[in-house]
């Protein structure tokens, strides 16, 4: 992996040399903006490859003494939350699974609506039903309320109500806490509904690399990240930072504070639970807006405050993680600059399309091979393959990433709402209107060239290629957002799901 990463760096430098020194730049401002748009993802991949180099294979990640269950006397309390409107059947399944956990201390349902049916369910299953109607701070506020007023266990599993844990979840996780410096143990976040449609597949695909190679690499560096959906914490660690962080990006901020406090963490590449992934674009984009806003806010407010207390590796990681949604700016520029250049006959760069592709090709080849090799750290065979759905979904999320970056930068409040657990097939014209605007303008800009240009040069051809590719990649999501108007049954056909 290290050799391949080094080849990838060479391939990137080969393309960068061509981009910066073998081309004619017409407008320095436009060239700078286009450079951000074109090089953002390759530069991010250089960091990802460095993380991959540190990845440890799962067989090398056994707890002290081997993969034996936790000692019999070690137990953990389990905390999950409920909000009004969430499906009752989901809680039946999850709470029954929680009640069957080995090494279970006390299970708590932190109810923000005090549902009498949930109260009866908790009584039947031996789960403590906690009234959280007046507790502020969204999910983390309820967790901290329970830790202050109810739970006294040395370890706590915080799990989302859609996640169904395996009976040995705690046995496998608690085994790692023999090291008194371990603050939390994170497992894979997997999904049992990812085959429902291509949105669900795409949303799940976006996580495969993170829960595979990235978290494994961070584990090798000693700083895997906590995910609020299914993470087991040492109570002392949470107490040392004043409890679970109450924030839009609560799990990321909790990880930052724990690592800044000197706690270590472990990533266990094992599917200890399976939950739900968004199955419609509206739900997915609302979730992404929350994350984009929260992570960008951390970049401006929390990372600078904690930076001096981070280890050198943690400084690099959290700086890279918190700037992830700056990619929304790069995505927007990549969509709008070709339109601007073509309509107004302004030029950012003069480079033949063939030269661009030839010099980019080595990087693409190495990146593809790297992705294929990295899949050996994935936790299930269904995660393997080319993540084409994820790439389409990422392209389609440009407006959400950009808006979240702006909201986080200016400190605009975005309400913390639980992700809906049931998808919707209703048209979402407001969400996809920007896509249709870009598609139409891109096509018109391409048609504008032969109608008005006296000469079509290399820079124009490159911008036409960019505009055409953008329109094609945005079209699936744009159509999905409005197709409910044109058909009676908006479910995806089985051949698309396959």
Image: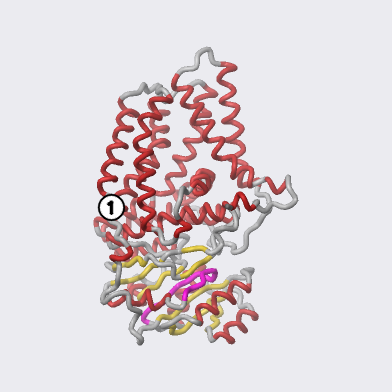
Task: Between residue 283 and residue 491, name the one nearer to us.
Answer: 491
- Residue lying furthest right in this view? 488
Q: Give the magenta part as a residue range.
A: 154-166
What kind of colouring is applied to the model shown? secondary structure
Whether 448 is among the magenta residues is no
Residue 297 place in picture, x, y as percent: 43, 54
Label 1: how many residues lie within 10 Å, few (<14), some (14-19) or many (20+)?
A: many
Residue at 49% in and 17% down: 456
Residue at 44% in and 67% down: 271
Residue 11 place in picture, x, y as percent: 31, 36
Residue 305 place in picture, x, y as percent: 32, 58
Element under label 1?
helix
The image quadrant of residue 27 is top left
Residue at 61% in and 36% down: 437
- Indicate whether 55 appears above or below 45: below
Q: Which residue is mark 1?
A: 53
Judge whether residue 300 can be spotted in this image. Answer: no
């Amino acid at each position: 992996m290290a050799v391949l990463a080094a080849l990838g760096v060479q391939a990137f430098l080969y393309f960068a040399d061509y981009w910066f020194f073998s081309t004619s730049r017409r407008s320095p401002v436009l060239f700078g903006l286009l450079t951000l748009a074109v090089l953002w993802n390759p530069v991010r991949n250089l960091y990802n490859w460095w993380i991959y180099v540190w990845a440890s294979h799962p067989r090398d990640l056994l707890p002290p003494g081997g993969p034996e269950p936790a000692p019999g006397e070690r137990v953990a309390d389990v905390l999950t939350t409920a909000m009004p409107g969430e499906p009752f059947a989901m809680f039946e399944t999850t709470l029954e699974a929680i009640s069957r956990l080995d090494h279970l201390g006390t299970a708590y349902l932190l109810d923000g609506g005090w549902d009498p049916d949930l109260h009866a369910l908790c009584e039947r299953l031996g789960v403590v039903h906690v009234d959280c109607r007046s507790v502020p701070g969204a999910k983390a506020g309820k967790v901290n309320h329970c830790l202050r007023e109810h739970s006294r266990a040395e370890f706590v599993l915080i799990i989302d109500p859609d996640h169904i844990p395996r009976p040995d979840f705690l046995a496998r996780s608690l085994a790692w806490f023999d090291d008194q410096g371990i603050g939390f143990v994170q497992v894979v976040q997997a999904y049992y509904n990812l085959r429902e449609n291509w949105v669900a597949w795409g949303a799940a695909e976006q996580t495969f690399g993170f829960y595979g190679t990235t978290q494994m690499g961070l584990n090798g560096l000693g700083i895997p990240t906590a995910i609020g959906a299914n993470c087991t914490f040492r109570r002392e660690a949470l107490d040392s930072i004043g409890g679970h962080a109450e924030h839009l990006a609560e799990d990321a901020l909790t990880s930052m504070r724990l690592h800044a406090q000197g706690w270590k963490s472990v990533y266990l590449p094992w599917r200890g639970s399976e939950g739900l992934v968004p199955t419609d674009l509206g739900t997915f984009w609302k979730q992404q807006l929350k994350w984009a806003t929260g992570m960008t806010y951390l970049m401006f407010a929390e990372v600078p405050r904690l930076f001096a207390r981070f280890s050198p590796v943690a400084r690099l990681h959290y700086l890279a993680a918190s700037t992830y949604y700056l990619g929304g700016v790069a995505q927007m520029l990549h969509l709008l600059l070709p339109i601007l250049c073509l309509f107004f006959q302004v030029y950012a760069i003069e480079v033949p399309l063939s030269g661009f592709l030839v010099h980019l090709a080595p990087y693409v080849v190495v990146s593809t091979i790297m992705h294929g090799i990295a899949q050996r750290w994935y936790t299930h065979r269904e995660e393997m393959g080319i993540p084409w759905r994820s790439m389409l979904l990422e392209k389609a999320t440009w407006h959400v990433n950009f808006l979240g970056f702006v909201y986080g930068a200016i400190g605009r409040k975005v309400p913390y709402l639980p992700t809906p657990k049931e998808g919707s097939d209703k048209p979402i014209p407001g969400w996809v209107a920007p896509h249709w605007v870009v598609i139409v303008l891109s096509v018109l800009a391409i048609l504008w060239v032969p109608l008005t240009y006296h000469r079509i040069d290399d820079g124009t051809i490159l911008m036409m290629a960019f505009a055409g590719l953008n329109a094609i990649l945005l079209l699936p999501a744009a159509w999905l957002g409005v197709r409910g108007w044109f058909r009676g049954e908006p479910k995806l056909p089985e051949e698309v799901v396959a």
